[in-house]
Image: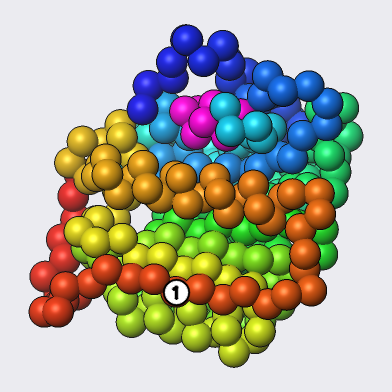
Amino acid sequence: MATMKSTGITPTMIKYGGGISAVRALPKAKGKRPAVIILHERYGIDQHTKDLTVKLAQAGFVGLAPDLFHRFAGDRKAVLRGEQRVDLTDEGALEDLNGAVEYLKRLKEVDAARIGIIGVCQTGRQPVLLAAKRSDIAGAVVLYGAIGGREWMGNNLRPTPIEDLTAQVSCPVLGIFGEADHIISIDDVVRFRNCLEKAKKNCHIRIYPGAPHGWLNDTMPGRYRRAQAEAAWAHQRAFLQTVLAPRYDRSTRIQRYAADIAADYDFSRNVRHE
């Protein structure tokens, strides 16, 4: 979705934490507002990420998209084209995200008690990681990331398995996934749901029909699915408005799961879309 001038909201580049670049978008609403950290896909800060910060601001949130690839010294244009992968470490991501949270808390436009985070694709793990390590995150959203195949196992870069992190999260979690995803299977989603429910966490899990990996990205026509993307955005917005509300009731456990899946679903038939 190209950023619309008619919104009256323009994303700006800022720096925090000693030089980390980030895109920021401020809502028109006055007074202290809830804030949402929106994490980029494997392409880094691209047009899609900038558009999402604007959409968050339109919905009344302060949007902030930090560049988690700022340590990478290689060809950034190749990263934007999807030809170069940049791996993230939990240690580095936590350092950057802790800095982002503290930056937001100091902004006069932000209500420091109402900060959420969204991770997309490669950065789907990071909202769970941050919510597991901090008690002041109000809501975490995972968009078709964090739980595909090897993500369930620890490694040198990310030593704590995602299953262990889910047991530590301190806030409600929304997970949004696609039926036709070639990376994340329905079994993975069900396992994620079971982990959250077993750990007695507030969680909402939704699987959208016919949606391949990356289906919310409208700058990539081959994978974008308009109807599912609009429905998922409405779901995210409603979730964030609920859990970031000043009087959100944390004394009630809410666990929801909804899925539209073909009776003959077969993960092996799912393919990558450009």
Front one among 84 and 242: 242
Q: In the rendered image, which residue does mark 1 sit on?
A: 257
Please say whether residue 194 is visible from this viewpoint: yes
Quadrant placement of the N terminus: top left
Helix, strand or loop at mark 1: strand
218 in relation to 41, above or below: above
225 in relation to 171, above or below: above
Front one among 205 and 40: 205
User: In the image, what residue occupies the spot 77% across and 64% down?
Assistant: 249
User: In the image, what residue occupies the spot 41% across and 40% down?
Assistant: 43
User: In the image, what residue occupies the spot 35% across and 66% down?
Assistant: 207
Residue farthest to the bottom? 198
- On screen, residue 70 versus residue 95, left or right, reads left
Please say whether residue 90 is visible from this viewpoint: no
The amino acid type, in three-letter code, at marker 1 is Tyr
Quadrant placement of the C terminus: top left
- On screen, residue 259 versus residue 70, left or right, reads left
Asked which quadrant contains residue 203, the reply is bottom right
Front one among 19 and 229: 229
User: In the image, what residue occupies the spot 50% across and 73% down?
Assistant: 256
Q: Which residues are magenta?
A: 50-57
- On screen, residue 49 versus residue 259, left or right, reads right
Q: Position of residue 23 (x, y in %)?
A: 61, 28
The verdict on residue 4 being magenta is no
The verdict on residue 51 being magenta is yes
Q: Position of residue 228 (x, y in %)?
A: 30, 49
